[in-house]
């Protein structure tokens, strides 16, 4: 008996759905990690900007300042991190703290241009 049927069987469709599910299980966590790392760029860039502002302020007043507005740091756009500066004379440490993926993310930057991720939300 010869049948001229077109289409897919239920087994073929189930196999395709299973393959898509496996690929999604692998791809989604990687996507979330890359998305988190891309948001961390804000902290890195703004801490470097604070460092530049502090260097300019130090060149003029021979000391660092804890007031980010006084040094000329005024970020714009959507800000995911809170920025603070601790300074004493010839040393400063700028800190960025925020919440990514419902986890805390913290970065520090100092007068020696040392950038450190003290609490990583993307791991």
Image (tube, rainbow, N blue to C red):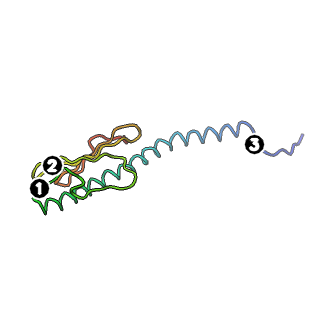
Q: Tell me the element at label 2.
A: strand
Q: Is residue 64 left or right of residue 76?
A: left
Q: Position of residue 88 (x, y in %)?
A: 11, 48
The part of the image, by quadrant, that contains residue 57 is bottom left
| x and y, in percent, of residue 108 in the image | 24, 47
Query: Residue under circle 3?
Result: 8
In the rendered image, the residue lying farthest to the right is 1
Mark 1, secondary structure of its residue? loop
Is 95 displayed left or right of 103 in the figure?
left
Query: Is 56 drawn above or below residue 82 in the view shown?
Result: below
Which of 97/27 is in front? 97
**Residue depicted at 39% across the width and 55% down the height:** 77
Q: Quadrant of the C terminus?
A: top left
103 on left or right of 59: right
Mark 3, Cα crowd under 10 Å, few <14 / some 14-19 / many 20+, is few
Q: Which residue was labeled with disc 2?
A: 87
**Which type of secondary structure does the marked residue at label 3 adopt?**
loop
Q: Which residue is mark 1?
A: 63
Q: What is the C-alpha distance between the residues marked 1 and 3?
A: 75 Å
Q: How many marks?
A: 3
**Label 1 with label 2: CB-CB less than 8 Å:** yes
Mark toward the viewer: 2 or 3: 2
* x 20%, y 55%: residue: 113
Residue toward you, 80 or 13: 80
């Amino acid at each position: 008996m010869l049948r001229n049927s077109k289409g897919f069987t239920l087994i073929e469709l189930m196999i395709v759905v299973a393959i898509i599910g496996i690929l999604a299980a692998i791809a989604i966590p990687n996507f979330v990690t890359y998305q988190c790392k891309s948001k961390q760029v804000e902290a890195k860039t703004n801490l470097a900007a604070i460092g530049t502002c502090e260097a300019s302020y130090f060149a003029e007043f021979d000391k660092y300042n804890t007031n980010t507005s006084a040094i000329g740091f005024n970020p714009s756009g959507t800000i995911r991190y809170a920025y603070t500066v601790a300074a004493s004379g010839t040393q400063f440490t700028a800190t960025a703290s925020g919440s990514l993926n419902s986890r805390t993310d913290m970065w520090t930057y100092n007068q020696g241009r040392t950038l450190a991720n003290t609490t990583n939300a993307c791991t």
